[in-house]
Structures are given as structure tokens and as C-alpha cells.
Amino acid sequence: MNQNQPGALALVGSGEYLPEAQELETELLRFGISRGKRNTYIQIPTAAGKEGEDRLDFWRQRGADQAARIGCEVKYLPVLTREDAHNQSWIEEIKSAGLIYFSGGDPVHLAEVFADTPMWRAIVQAWHEGASLAGCSAGAMAFGGKIIGIRRSHITEGLGLIPDIEVIPHYDKFLGWLPDRVTAAIVRKDANTALLGIDENTAVVLTDQWRKYGTGKVHVLRGEFELSEELFPYN
């Protein structure tokens, strides 16, 4: 058991908790377990926090269904406000989990709730100590230093976990829906970061290297980004 080694980090274009993502989420959890963490899957639906109780219940049930398929314990933490991100009992749940997963919605709201909070610091520490950490769509966007404006036109501050990377999730769809916004993000003159377009049902996963998972592509749209030719999961 390789304790106190960093866990995996996954930036996911779409598909959290779906059967299509079962292999990815199983492997992320297994990776955390191999580093001394528990067979526990943490769901954090913050990005959907403004969408109403029905939508939050939808995410909760979808995560529970995935956990049943994987065969793991699931903990749903409805962190909807900055006050929630100070909840000590939820912070304790995070510390031993094998996988911590941020699902989709509004990346700006997600970053505003978590920035400079005890729970975010606990999540980063848990990742450094072996937990796998994943963000899908809004979750992936919020992990960067900047959140680019695809649905909105402005740039906002991210959580800074990966300050040198910005993400466009659902890239294969956004390119058709909002091509002008995508182009503006690529040619932004004030950016000195790598910009990744991650297709639906696709992820890029960092362990010792960045590797692709899934059926789509990872597009390096700006800057430098080294992606291994090996796929995740790997032996």
C-alpha cells in the first residue's frame, strides 16, 4: 500500500456518474485506495447549487446509482454556500475518501463557494495525500487559475489548483454551438496558459503523466501541454 503519495487528478469533459464513465470512476477510486484511502466516493454538487432541489436530487440519485455499480460507499455533500464549506463533519468525511468528485453546472458559482475555505484546503490536502480528485465540466473548469467565458463573455478567477491550465469541456459540442466564444478564448491576448478542449465522454487524467481516457479527443488549443500516448487506465 503506497500511502502519502498524490492521488490522480481528472478533468472530465462530460458524463459524470453515467455507465459510460464507470470504468474511469472505478479506476480513480482504485487509485486512491492504492494510496491508503477508503472505498468511499464523495459527491460534491455545488456547481448545480442554483438549479433547484429537483436538479440536486437528480445528481444525488445518479451518483448513488454509479456507486452501486462500482461497489463502493457514497457520500453526498450538498455544499451550496460558503458557510457549508466550513462544515467540520463534512471535512472529516473528505479526509479518508478514495475519490472526491465535483459535478457540473456553473463553474463560477463553484469557485465562489470554495475559494479560500477550510473544505477546499482539506480537499487539496487529501489529494496530495492520495485521494483521487475529479471535476466534470464546471468542476474541471473551476480547477484552473482562470475560468474562461464560454456561456458568459467574461473571465473569472478559478480555484488555482492547476493554474497553468484552462479548460473548455463538452468541446465537440461547444465548438458547434458557440464557435465565436471558443475562438475568442483561444486567441485571448492576456493568457499565458495552456487551453484544453475536452470532448464529451472524455477525460484527461494526471498521475505520473497526463493521459487521455474515453472515446473523444483532448485538443490543445493554446500553449504547451504534454499528453502521454498511453491511455488511462494503464498497467
Image (cartoon, rainbow, N blue to C red):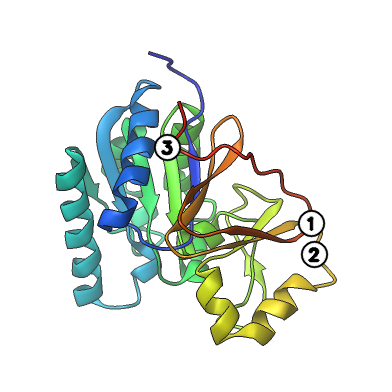
- Secondary structure beneath dot 2 equals loop
Q: Would you say the residues marked 1 and 2 are in contact, meaning their CB atoms lie under 8 Å apart?
A: yes
Nearer-N-terminus badge (1/2): 2
Give the Cα distance between marks 1 and 3.
26 Å
User: Which amino acid type corresponds to the residue marked 3 in the rendered image?
Assistant: Ser
Task: In the rendered structure, find residue 232 and report the number of the disc placed on it.
Answer: none
Identified at 55% across, 54% down, the residue is 143
Residue 7 lies, in percent from the top left, at: 47, 31
Residue position for label 1: 223
> Could you tell me which residue is drawn at 51 percent across and 57 percent down?
140
In the image, what residue type sits under mark 2?
Answer: Ala
The residue to which callout 2 is attached is: 191
For marks 2 and 3 on the same chain, the one whose residue lies earlier in the sequence: 3
Disc sitting over residue 132 in the figure? 3
Q: Label 2, label 3: how many angstroms apart (C-alpha)? A: 28 Å
Q: Which quarter of the figure has residue 142? A: bottom right
SS assignment at label 1:
loop
What residue is shown at x 67% (from left), y 73% (from top)?
155
Q: What type is the residue that disc 1 sits on?
A: Gly
